[in-house]
Image: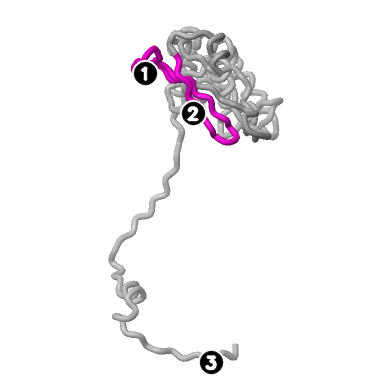
Amino acid sequence: MGMQYKIIYKKGIYNGDVDALSRMTHTQVHLCVVSTVHHVWLQDVVATYSMDKKAQEIMEKLAAAPDHTFGPFKLVQGVIRVKGAVWIGNILIIHHGIFQAFRTSPIGGHSGFPVTYRRFRSLFRWVGMRQFFKQQVQSCMICQQAKPEQILYPGKLQPLCVPQGVWKVVTMDFIERLPTLGSFNAIIVFVDTFTKYAHFIPLEHPFTAAHIVDVS
């Protein structure tokens, strides 16, 4: 290629990394293992298809289809899927096992019927699933004690407006249960939010709203 280069020897003490590789013995045995993950519970799910009439009908139609697709159902490695969710046969033992495993996990929790059903429905499907979840949530004491907040998420925080002048916006607070001095045992505090100037007025507890108006 027309390049000029020169080969220069470098002692091993000055080239430790390369020297270590060149002196490595070839008698060492390296074991390379390729591991794969197999979901054991999927085998139990596939086993439920032979005991469920609805699953058998779906399997027959999927087997006859050229692309293993029938309506919303699709056969993926022997597992029936509905829009990505795993189809489960009508076997109550499998239903209870999946429900308990998911609900006791950190991401599951006892979130009540609407949230729990929506999460499960994106992962699993079976006949009568909605009614099954209603019964399970109603029979769970922790789910009944949980009080999820059924409101929309709040919007962005709205900062307070800057006052246009002195004593335009005033805050009021009370300091009570103080040692008695004369007849006073409480203090009312007025603070101007613009200048942070404050007034401290002594009060006698108990007091009324009319008395606060007179004092202010």
Residue at image location 54% in from the left, 19% down from the top: 116
Reply above or below: 164 against 133: below
- What secondary structure is marked by label 2? helix
Q: Which label's residue is closer to the chain start, 3 or 2?
A: 3
Label 1 and label 3: CA atoms lie apart by 93 Å
Q: Decide if residue 93 is on the left or right side of residue 191.
A: left
Picture coordinates of residue 215 (x, y %)?
A: 54, 16
Q: In which quarter of the image is the C terminus?
A: top right
Question: What amino acid is labelled 1 in the image?
Answer: Leu
Q: Which label's residue is closer to the chain start, 2 or 1?
A: 2
Residue at image location 53% in from the left, 92% down from the top: 4
Picture coordinates of residue 55 (x, y %)?
A: 59, 19
Asked which quadrant contains residue 30, the reply is bottom left
Reply above or below: 91 against 192: above
Picture coordinates of residue 21 (x, y %)?
A: 34, 72
Residue 173 visible to an observer of this rendering: yes
Label 3 and label 2: CA atoms lie apart by 64 Å
Q: Which of 106 and 12 is in front in this view?
A: 106
Residue assigned mark 2: 42
Residue assigned mark 1: 178
Mark 2 or 1: the one toward you: 1
Mark 3 or 2: the one toward you: 3
Residue at image location 53% in from the left, 25% down from the top: 190
Q: In which quarter of the image is the N terminus?
A: bottom right
Magenta stretch: give its range: 175-203
